[in-house]
Amino acid sequence: MLSTRDLVLCALFAALLGGLGMAPPIPLGFLPVPITAQTLGVMLAGTILGARRGGLAALLFVLLVAAGLPLLAGGRGGIGVLMGPTGGFVLAWPLGAVITGWLAERFASGTSPVRLFAVSVVGGILAVYAVGIPWLALVAGLPIEKAALGTMAFLPGDLIKAGVCAFAAAAVRRAGILPLHA
Amino acid sequence: MLGLYLHRDSAVHRLPAGAKMGGLLLLTAVVLTLPGAWGALAAMVAGAALLAAARLPPGRVLRDLRAPVVMLALLFGIQALLAGTGWQDAAIAVARFAALILLATVVTLTTRVMDMVDLFERLFGLLRPLGVNPAKMALMLALTIRFVPLLGDLVREVRMAQRARGVERNMAALFVPLLVKILTMADDLTAALEARGYDPADTGSQR
Amino acid sequence: MIELRSVTHAYGDRPVLHDLSLRLEERRIAILGGNGSGKSTLARLLNGLIVPTAGSVSVDGLDTRRDGRAVRQRVGFVFQNPDTQIVYPTVEEDLAFGLKARRLPRDEIARRVAAALERYGLARYRHQPAHQMSGGEKQLLAIAGVLVLEPSHVVFDEPTTLLDLRNRRKVIQLVRDLPQRVVVVTHDLDMIMDFDRVVVLEGGRVVADGPPAEAVPAYVERLG
Ligand SMILES: Nc1ncnc2c1ncn2[C@@H]1O[C@H](COP(=O)(O)OP(=O)(O)OP(=O)(O)O)[C@@H](O)[C@H]1O
Ligand SMILES: [Mg+2]
């Protein structure tokens, strides 16, 4: 059963995803696309809250986007965006958070940034791409290899985010706050 | 948080959220199963008709549609140029989804966020046998809506504080204080909910 | 009446309140003390938000450990930061929150919410997002959200700390006019000058207890 604190944490992390979408994206010069931190929020939800609560946080967020709140970076939202070519990359967030969280609970419950990085990559990048790329191919009538190739433009940014997530989650764990199993 | 909803006095606006979502689902199934471009054409006509019936300003709708449609067109153009053959299939896919995005946008623009959230809550009620607690889902959705602007402020604030200390573009330096702050908020908020009599063991069967 | 019997409270193995026995029966009681002296811990014990590690707390004879739910119905609690007390997006919905948690009938909820909107001057904000209100208005809403539950006691933990002068006065006036029994944790000496009793804590022990004219100077002296 979800405790009051669980409910609150899920809602706050869902709101964090929205809050990150409201901040202007961070241009990193050497990358072709500016970084929005929202997918980092997904990785953090998984690594810090675990599979159940992290997945729930991402689900709440996606539901509110579907309900018509402009919570995606750039003030976008609504069902149309979710059904659009990049919609799969957002619809996959609950799954991504669950997988990140599941892996984190088993293999990265300590303060090792390397392990935290690895689980963020698998859950926050691979799982999300595994849904987003076929979706893109389907919607845009693209061959899947081309959809995958196009997506690679986002890979460097996403890897940086996994690194930031690993660093931040490790620091928070070292400080002994927000325990994964509590 | 007003959402993307655009208020107009129209029959489309007055339709219940459940009917609109159900209709959208049905049309999606139809469009994706009808052979060739017929489904796309039908959906396009339906979308345009609904748009007119809803008295939505076309300019605003086009603005909302611009990003996904431009992207679709671009992707299609590149393909048609590069691949040459098979462009008809791609054209059909693009037309289908462009039409569906139009329909979905009409639903979003004509349905209040709270009506959609109410619909979700009723749907969660159906999942009760699977252990889903609709009252808890409803509370979490409301809390999220309440806290999005606050976390937006918090993100900005922490970013500003880092910048003031000369730390630019360091996302790690942004997230640690942000997470610490979220934890404090979680403690306070939990206490406030319980002080007002919220009991998580309550099944909430009344609502 | 709230009664503490030999209350000790520790976080982990660190005690922060030591063997406190108090009968709180006056109508207006203030709790003073330096930072970390245990004021918030004491306040949270009063409505069962936390239960003591040793000893007991009771409200009108109800034990906070055994009858937590009934105690919380009797004792309302207002915190320092309004931002983490308002839980629903709009004013009207937030006022209804505690009433819904108590499973009151719909029309009763509507009636009480409407009355509270009027009484606390929130009617014109009714459908407004809480986020767009000023700090003082938010604190008024937070207080209204507690009072709408009609508790017999209200505990305030530094309710004016984040407010400007004008909103501080508003909140002080509101507290002064409350018909309920009130316990206020505060650093705001203006607020408590006409209170019936002032309890001063230091290091988790009561170091002064009496009418403001006696206890406040003792407090000021200790801090200075
Ligand atoms: N949840 C907690 N876990 C561990 N220690 C805590 C917790 N809450 C408070 N403490 C510690 O207990 C002591 C008393 O804290 P309390 O919050 O009761 O003090 P206070 O008098 O309200 O202080 P302030 O004036 O700063 O609000 C402090 O040393 C504090 O660090
Ligand atoms: Mg305190």
Image: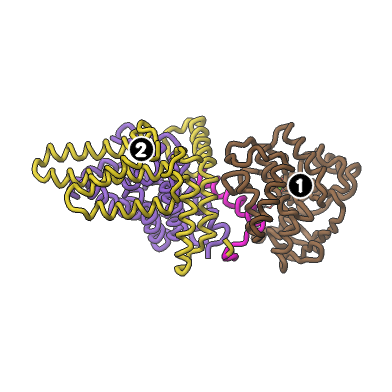
Chain colours: A purple, B yellow, C brown
Disc number lying in front (1 or 2): 2
**In this orientation, which residue lies closer to the viewer: C157 or B5?**
B5
- Marks 1 and 2, how far apart in space? 60 Å
Residue A51 appears in which quarter of the rendering? bottom left
Instruction: Give the left or right position of residue A82, taking residue B204 as reference.
Output: left
Q: Secondary structure at mark 1?
A: strand
Q: Amino acid at mark 2?
A: Ala
Instruction: Report the residue marked by disc 1.
Output: C185
Q: Main secondary structure of the magenta part?
A: helix
Magenta span includes B189: yes
Residue C149 appears in which quarter of the rendering? bottom right
- Looking at the image, is A52 positioned above or below residue C203? below
On the image, the x and y values in percent for residue A24 come to: 42, 34
Residue segment shown in magenta = B178-205
**In this orientation, which residue lies closer to the viewer: B2 or B17?**
B17
Instruction: Give the left or right position of residue C212, taking residue B164 as reference.
Output: right
Query: Residue B52 has which mark?
Result: 2
**In this orientation, which residue lies closer to the viewer: B124 or A120?**
B124
- Looking at the image, is C184 positioned above or below residue C70? above
Observer able to see residue B195: no
Magenta span includes A10: no
